[in-house]
Image: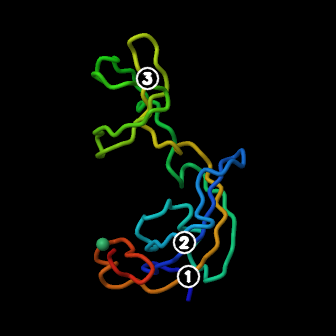
Amino acid sequence: MKIKKDSVAAITYTLKNDAGEVLDSSVGKDSLYYLHGHGNLVIGLEDELENKAKGDKFSVAVPAEKGYGMADENLVQSVPLSAFGTNKVEVGMQFHADGPAGQVVVTVIEIAGDQVKIDGNHPLAGVTLHFDIVVDEVREATSEELAHGHVHGPGGHHH
Ligand code: ZN
């Protein structure tokens, strides 16, 4: 069967950036199971997976617009160091903050004197996503998975 809306597919994936650096990979680990057509993967990747079948292999470059979006400079801001209280603050540190659309991951990108520059963009915003994909399995979703809008693992059961 082919991947279509409401299919559950299992994929092995490797994600690289433009420089060819591996950012994430499931090679050698369990396959990633997902419910197709419910926004569980970035749209550019779901578009490519449509109509693929078990055993299919492909590579795709997903532009940021169809990946994690473009970086928004409004999400980069300076806050006083004192806002962190007694916590140690370092460049590269990530923490959760409340944003207009719910919780976001914020990254410390610069510390200058008593000002801390933070970036609320997704770490992969503005990045072209290079995926190498192998389709390991395709099956129908269970009614419970469809009701929840996500997959329940290889056999369709909650863990
Ligand atoms: Zn569930």
For the residue carrying disc 2, how many other residues have a C-alpha within 10 Å: few (<14), some (14-19), or many (20+)?
some
Frontmost of labels 2 and 3 is 2
Type of amino acid under label 2: Ser
Q: How far apart are marks 2 and 1 (CA)?
A: 9 Å
Q: Vertical placement of 150 versus 22: above or below?
A: below
Residue beneath disc 3? 117
Q: In which quarter of the image is the N terminus?
A: bottom right
| On-image quarter of the C terminus | bottom left
* Residues tagged 2 and 1 counted as in contact (Cβ below 8 A): yes
Label 1 element class: strand
Q: In this view, does 132 lie above or below 129?
A: below
| Three-letter code, disc 3 | Lys
Q: In this view, does 21 lie above or below 79?
A: below
The answer for how far apart the CA atoms under marks 3 and 1 are is: 44 Å
Residue at figure coordinates x 42%, y 84% from the top left: 155
Determine which of the numbered discs, if any, sits on residue 31 in the image.
2
- Mark 3 crowd level (few <14, some 14–19, many ≥20, 10 Å Cα): some
Q: Is disc 3 placed on a helix, strand or loop? A: strand
Q: How is the image coloured?
A: rainbow
Residue shown at 30% from the left, 39% from the top? 99
